[in-house]
Image: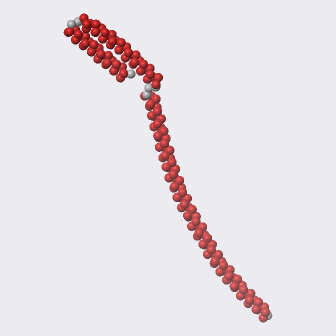
């Protein structure tokens, strides 16, 4: 029995060593698992912070892009309004040329009348005395003034 006792004792010793070894490794394993859990938790928190920062940056960029787009559309709308105002307020080339031709025709007509008045005044001037000459010059000057006034009215009115 001695041998049996020896093996039993040896087995008990080995069993104790194995249990101690297992307990020691479980402790190491537990510490490793805790360390891994802590690192995973830190990484998750870091990713959350980075995602928040990215989301804030994207929100800011979107707001800036929207503001720039709105500003651009405001500029385009102002330009369209300017074009619309020009279309209603400005003359076309054809309208201008037609009105200008009417004005030129009126000026030519007034020049013809003035020439006729001047020649009439010159004929009468030759027949009259010096006081008559003064009267003719006054009529010619007055008709010149009247024709200039009419021309200015036509130019300003057109």
2 or 80, which lies in front?
80
What residue sits 68% from the left and 80% below the top? 22
Point out the image quarter for the N terminus: bottom right
Q: Residue furthest toward the top?
A: 127
Point out the image quarter for the C terminus: top left
38 or 72, which lies in front?
72
In the depicted structure, whether residue 10 falls above or below residue 38: below
The quadrant where residue 113 appears: top left
Q: Residue furthest toward the front?
A: 126
Side of 18 where 62 appears, left or right: left
Side of 134 where 65 appears, left or right: right
Q: Residue furthest toward the bottom?
A: 2
What residue sits 40% from the left and 18% below the top? 104
Side of 128 where 24 appears, left or right: right
What residue sits 36% from the left and 12% below the top? 112
44 or 143, which lies in front?
143
What residue sits 61% from the left and 75% below the top? 31
Residue 16 at x, y percent in the picture:
69, 85
The colour scheme used here is secondary structure
In the depicted structure, whether residue 37 falls above or below residue 60: below
Residue 98 at x, y percent in the picture:
44, 20
Q: How many marks?
A: 0
Side of 77 where 42 appears, left or right: right
Residue 88 at x, y percent in the picture:
45, 28
Residue 24 at x, y percent in the picture:
65, 80
95 or 114, which lies in front?
114
In the depicted structure, whether residue 84 falls above or below residue 73: above
């Amino acid at each position: 029995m001695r041998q049996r006792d020896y093996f039993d004792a040896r087995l008990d010793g080995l069993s104790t060593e194995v249990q101690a070894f297992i307990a020691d490794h479980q402790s190491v394993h537990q510490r490793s698992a805790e360390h891994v859990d802590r690192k995973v938790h830190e990484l998750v928190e870091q990713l959350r912070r980075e995602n928040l920062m990215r989301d804030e940056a994207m929100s800011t960029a979107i707001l800036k892009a929207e503001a720039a787009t709105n500003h651009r559309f405001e500029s385009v709308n102002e330009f369209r309004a300017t074009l619309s105002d020009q279309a209603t307020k400005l003359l076309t080339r054809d309208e201008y040329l037609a009105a200008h031709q009417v004005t030129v025709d009126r000026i030519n007509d007034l020049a013809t009348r003035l020439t006729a008045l001047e020649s009439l005044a010159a004929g009468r001037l030759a027949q009259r005395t010096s006081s008559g000459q003064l009267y003719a010059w006054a009529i010619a000057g007055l008709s010149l003034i009247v024709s200039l006034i009419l021309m200015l009215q036509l130019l300003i009115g057109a």
